[in-house]
Image: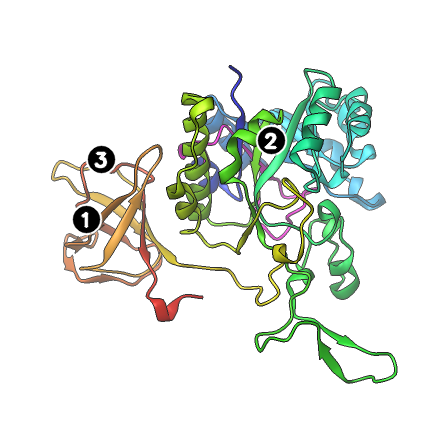
Amino acid sequence: MNKVELLAPAGDLERLKIAIEYGADAVYLGGENFGMRSAAKNFSIEDIKEGVEYAHSRGKKVFVTVNIIPHNEDFEGFTEYLQDLNGAGVDALIASDPGVIDVIKNTLPNMEIHLSTQANTTNYQSAKFWYNQGVKRVVVARELSFKEIKEIRESIPEDMDIEAFMHGAMCISYSGRCLISNYMTGRDANRGSCAQSCRWKYSLVEEKRPGEYFPIYEDDRGTFFFNSKDMCMIEYIPELIESGITSLKIEGRMKTAYYVATVVRAYRMAIDEYYKSPENWKFNPIWLDELKKGSHRHFTTGFYTDKPGSEEQNYASASYVRNYDFTGIVVSEKDENGFVTVEQRNKMIVGDSIEIIGPYTHTITTEIVEMFDEEGNSIQEAPHPRQLIKMKLPEEIGMNFMLRKEIEEEKKA
């Protein structure tokens, strides 16, 4: 059985490694140019080489975005950049523009090309057109149902892949082709600089009554009528796989390492459970609970099951829901005395009740009994960012395991 690919975002090397450790089959990332997330830290060519080596040594793949909608000046240095990516050993390039695809084909004729969701592919005729242009994989538009994706799968060549987003932020505009940010801030969303203007607070002004602002939706927190909920398809793993999707994609190159670990881990568990016995797969609410322990907006199934209605928009707030703090990550194996080194990410105090998550394991609940600094001195708290702490944790804990604690109710955002 050819298993579906679990594809995760990587905003930097740490997140690339975490995604792979926690179960991703492939990662996608942006270099310092030509990608749709210019505000992300992104990867230098040296970082990409290191990331590719790390992934390939574990049997995983790396895809790189070159998916801006370019203007003339954006092609300057592009062929040289493509050569650098090829030299780094990347497995595929993700593009949306016909000109970019043509340059890739002429410069790197053996490079695998994936068509970005920015190209808005919504039908099998378009998919076949792109296949004839040398595209191996099409990342279909988010605005498709299970039925439409299945029809595309049945009508395109067998060796063409379908990739689809299954988790993460949704865009107010058609598959991300948005002009609001460019119009309002001068930051071109189609060249990687989206200001997320759709998340802002808006009011209505009537032509003959300038200066009088009318809220579209009555709420003392504001009006956010462009603000979509986040996609979450963890309850629909069989439908996703059986619709013929080759690769299930998680959105979020701007997200934290903890977010990547949490989401990849939950979907890895759900997908693996499906392949144990597809006909007996049953949704486990624990997977959804895990997703909610990362920073998120309220969830929606987008267009997969039906056309979205008013319930798919969050009119009340553009804020994230945050119930847990990521407090630390294990950065060493156990020493001869049974201690591991933890790098602090949020304040920890002796006596804190914490949860520990790791790749392919259940969630462990424990308490911080004691902590020591690098000199071996006993400490009661770890308040400093990236402070290194020695502590004893349960036996099954290893490298890249993550510690988190529930946020006190009055502090939750």
The furthest residue to the left: 337
Cα separation, mark 3 vs mark 1, equals 14 Å
Dot 1, how many residues are within 10 Å of its Cα: few (below 14), some (14-19), or many (20+)?
A: some
Nearer the N terminus, badge 1 or badge 2?
2
Q: How is the image coloured?
A: rainbow
Give the labeled residue for mark 2: 63
Helix, strand or loop under label 1: strand
Question: Does residue 60 appear left or right of residue 80 in this picture?
Answer: left
Residue 349 is inside the magenta segment: no
Marks 1 and 2, how far apart at CA: 37 Å
Q: Amino acid at mark 1?
A: Met
Disc 3 on helix, strand or loop?
loop
Residue 391: give its label: 1
Kindly identify which numbered label has been placed on residue 396.
Answer: 3
Please provide percent x and percent y for residue 140.
70, 34
Q: Residue at x 53, y 55 (%)?
A: 298
Magenta stretch bounds: 19-43
* Amino acid identity at mark 3: Glu
Vertical order, 188 against 340 (above or below): below
Image quadrant of residue 240?
top right
Residue type at numbered disc 2: Phe
Q: Tell whether label 1 touches label 3 (CB within 8 Å).
A: no
- Residue 117: x and y in percent read 70, 38
Residue 144 x, y percent position in the rendering: 70, 38
